[in-house]
Image (tube, helix red, strand yellow):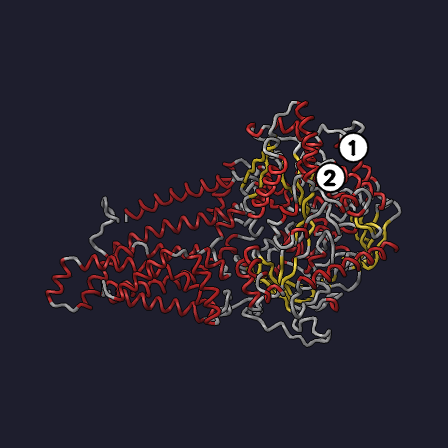
Amino acid sequence: MKYILIRLSRSLLTLIIVVTVVFLLMRMMPIEGYFGASFDKLDEAQKTAKLNNLGLLDPWYIQLKNFYTDILKGDLGESITYRPKVAITKILGDKLITSIRFGLASLAVSLIVGLSLGIVMARFKGKFWDKLGTCYVVGANAVPAVIYYLLIQVYFTDIFKLPLLYSKSDPKSWILPVLCLSLVNIAYYAMWIRRYMVDELNKDYVRLARAKGLKNKDIMTRHVMRNAFVPMAQYLPASILYTVSGSIYVESLFSIPGTGGLLVTAIQRQDNTLVQALVLLYSSIGIVGLMLGDILMASFDPRIKLSQEGGSR
Amino acid sequence: MKKILSLLLILAMILTACSGGKPPVSQTPETPETPGPAEEQPEDADGGKYAEEQVYKTVYAEEIQTINYLTTTTNVEFALAANLVDTLVDYDMYGVLQPALAETWEVSDDGLTWTFHLRKGVKWLDFEGTEVAETTAHDFVSAAAYILVPENESATANLFYSVIKNAEEYFNGDITDFSEVGIKAEDDYTLVYTLKEPVPYFESMLTYVCFFPAYGPFLEEMGDQFGTTNSALLYNGAYILSEFEPQMHRILTKNPTYWDSENIHIVELNYKYNKEATSLAGEMYKRGEITAVELPASIIDEWMNNPELKAQVRPGTLGNYSWFYAFNFDPKFDAQYEPENWKIAVNNPNFRKSVVSAINRIAAMQTEEPYNPEYRIINTITPPNFAAQGGLDYTQTGALKAITEGDFFDKDKAVEYKNKAVEELTAAGATFPVKILMPYNTNSTSWANEAQVVKQQLETTLGADYIEVTLLPHAPTGFLDGTRRAGNYSFMKVNWGPDYADPQTYTDPFERGFNYNFPEYTTDVTADGQNIFEVYEAKVNEAKAEVTDLAKRFELFAEAEAMLIDNAFVMPYNVSGGGYVASKVHPFEAPYSSFGISSERWKGQKLLAKPMNTEEFEAAQQEWQAAREAALKEAAKK
């Protein structure tokens, strides 16, 4: 319990530092960015009026104070250049839900297929399935994702008569984006679970279990899997939480209105409030995710004690 | 362990079931997005020219930020607003002014008071098509009152207050009584504008967003949420924004109560957002999922080499952003590029002319338009077809006629000028080679290539002992701030877009104290010893003051512009637009205006049964050009 509290307070400090630094950096950008291409045509009076409205003419500590008081009231503010005057919670709301859905769907698919593939590869180590799986893993890691996403989109839509772009009303339009998102993760999970399982299989307790006469299947599922999964559990909560950030490329290709690319666009457009809100969101998620991961890992493996030195992996 | 695995499996099944199966609840009537019905049904009353189904579909990569037409300045947002809200006047397909929301209008003898008599029975609808109110003269006043409040951040307010009496004073807070501003609704259907001084091009400004109407009570009710979504807007134009989901799609449906609805043939405009639209649009067009595509440079070669595809491609129409190369008369760059030396060289007319004559603009243009480089080249700062007076296009007026019909490129002359310049400059104390700093924006590969070509041309024709061109790549963020506005260049390509349909707008970049090429610092003189810029300025002021004899006004502006070009203060280069499109939209049937948003309207436009190819386009363009000249002459007689 004490451990969690200490961890939380350290995380909060990190969060505050990160958000403040981003806040200040955004305000060092040239003001030309808030106006876009028409900057040359605007009068001084118009420029001052707009900057005043955005609160950008106040000294930086006043702006910072206003920002934090607003956050504490639960007000994330309005977007300034991305979609002017629209509340950020409104912009983020739908996008987050869409990205999370896709993220979770692809996570589920990758876990199931990836873990199964990894287990099969470990079971038949050195034989055909292992070799096939390794080909796939190497391929998925070596070929840049941008290439096969586009190829999948153009050719699979033709061959399987699937829609080119995502649309809410058409469930078939989910298939290709989820497939694209899962491909790399399947390779990742397969590779790691195979590695950990092979590690475990070389340990003494497995030989003992075999000597005792336990069925291979039982050894795998009751003992080896559980131990092998522990290191992967550390990253599972973070993966789930990171689905909120969406996937930039898949979302752009398939017209999915998610959060992927939102941060990049917001930075390019110098939309201070949106960038701050997103940084706050992503940092919090990262911090919470890591913490949950450690806790989950500890719950899997009683040998791991978090509060001692060198306890968490 | 089994339990955990089974739990995971169950979780996974639930999630995939959620994501795959359940049809989501949508707020607005959905239109199917998957490959639409075939648009090629050649049997038609016109003998097969027009498509049977008039639905326009496209993908776009740049999302609009707001629909509040009173504050915005981006082209995509204008294009949207143009079709949702009508204006007092509009243009026909030849660029002749037509009545729109105003049926008749007149101007007082002193040119200061414009009175407009509005059409009756034009309704404001909401996004579902329900009637809310009638459009009256008060709506224009409400819109103006909104724009002139600085807190509303209208980016076009300055255009409004540059002509309307007391508007600027009200904006700055010098007067607080809005009734003193020169816009009044004398009754529901009579609108009166009072100008600061006579403005001959005032009518052309009326199609710009700052002169749009907005229903007062609705505007007040919405406050700063006006125009943030389609339900926060009222419509009296040709179309209603029935669906609007940013980063997804927007759909415009024909307004059934539109006063001119018999001229609106396309019943639905369907825009689907896709960030990778440039990569996918070509493919989607081939599959018939979209009606028109602008071919990105990456696939033009592929299309041109395939005869079947080539038959569907035609050049895009020209825009009105004018690009020209400018000589900087107030250099403020790094000492290593020798600004002091540049200052001596740039004030020598033979030096400037040698540079201009050495550039083969057609060869440079090939980096952007490999198949048709001459198409966009212009010889004047003001593009052709921008403004005409008495049926005569501005670029054919007075001193500009010879420039339009000539060319600057002449290698022999370039060497001649160089020899004279070397003599004169050595006497003036300059050192050779003269360093030329030429920045370009790295976000454009074609500009980078063009810069290389220009550098090569200059150094080959004039010799590396005479000039040394240094290219300065600059990132897109803060590009203009870091180069042009800071005086951090010797010679660079810049551009300007018009603010109204009169040649005066293209003199704005050269105003004293502005931030283009600082010509007021020149020491170069005319044949009779007067400072060239002062003569130019005087001529421009004379032209601006000429508000009654418009033919003379155009001639005076033409003289001024010819001065800049003949003295090689700038080198006109090209006009925006061009490129290649594969499109079922006829390029010359929509309203045409060189300024304002009329060209973005779909009035009169019909979708063709098959796309127009290049030969048909060229024939159609010639036909249009001739018809336009005739129409302008006709209109000038009235």
In the visual, does A91 lie left or right of B204?
A: left
Q: Is residue B223 left or right of residue A308?
A: right
Tag 2 subunit: B
Instruction: Indicate which disc residue B535 carries.
Output: 1
Splitting the image into 4 quarters, where does residue B452 fall? top right
For the residue pair B425 and B116, the one nearer the viewer reads as B425
Residue in view at x 39 percent, y 68 percent: B16
Residue B68 seen: no
Are callouts 2 and 1 both on one chain?
A: yes
Sequence-earlier tag: 2 or 1:
1
Q: Which residue is mark 2?
A: B565
Q: Amino acid at mark 2?
A: Ile
Amino acid found under the numbered disc labelled 1: Val
Q: Nearer the viewer, residue A285 or B303?
A: B303
The reply to whether residue B384 is in sight is yes
Image point (33%, 68%), residue name: B10
